[in-house]
Image (cartoon, rainbow, N blue to C red):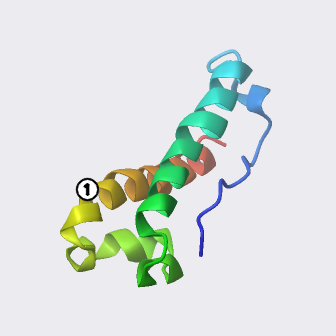
Amino acid sequence: MAYTLPPLPYAYNALEPHIDARTMEIHHTKHHQAYINNVNAAIQGTDFEKLSVEELIRDLNKVPENIRTTVRNNGGGHANHSLFWTIMA
């Protein structure tokens, strides 16, 4: 399962004037997407591809040490941002 960028539950300009639309768009499509790209690349070709991101980061001790930091930082970043977008609604 390759992780994908979840759609925002609102328009990029929905949080203006507090957060402008361009900042939201960049943070969503570039920053969050980078987390997804990096974790997908780290687990490509492994059995970890079958797990949800929550399952993947729940037990990091099962993740090989050579990709553990990448999985923790980027899988965690993806999970955190996915939650972040929903609580900002």
Q: Is residue 39 above or below residue 88?
A: below
Q: Is residue 42 above or below residue 15?
A: below
Q: Quadrant of residue 39?
A: bottom left
Residue drawn 43% across the image and 49% down it: 77
Residue 74 on image: x %, y %: 40, 52
Q: How many marks?
A: 1
Residue 34 on image: x %, y %: 53, 43
SS class, disc 1: helix
Residue drawn 39% across the image and 56% down it: 76
Residue 85 on image: x %, y %: 60, 45
Residue 51 on image: x %, y %: 48, 80
Q: Which residue is mark 1?
A: 69
Residue drawn 77% across the image and 42% down it: 10
Q: Quadrant of residue 65?
A: bottom left
Residue 75 visible in the shown view: yes
Q: Quadrant of the N terminus?
A: bottom right
- Pick the residue in front: 55 or 42: 42
Q: Quadrant of the C terminus?
A: top right
- Pick the residue in front: 56 or 39: 39
- Taking the view exactly as shown, the residue that stands out farthest to the top is 17
Residue 83 visible in the shown view: no
- Label 1 Cα neighbours within 10 Å, binned few <14 / some 14-19 / many ≥20: some
Would residue 38 appear left or right of 13 to someone viewing this image? left
Residue drawn 48% across the image and 76% down it: 45
The amino acid on which the numbered mark 1 sits, given as a three-letter code, is Thr
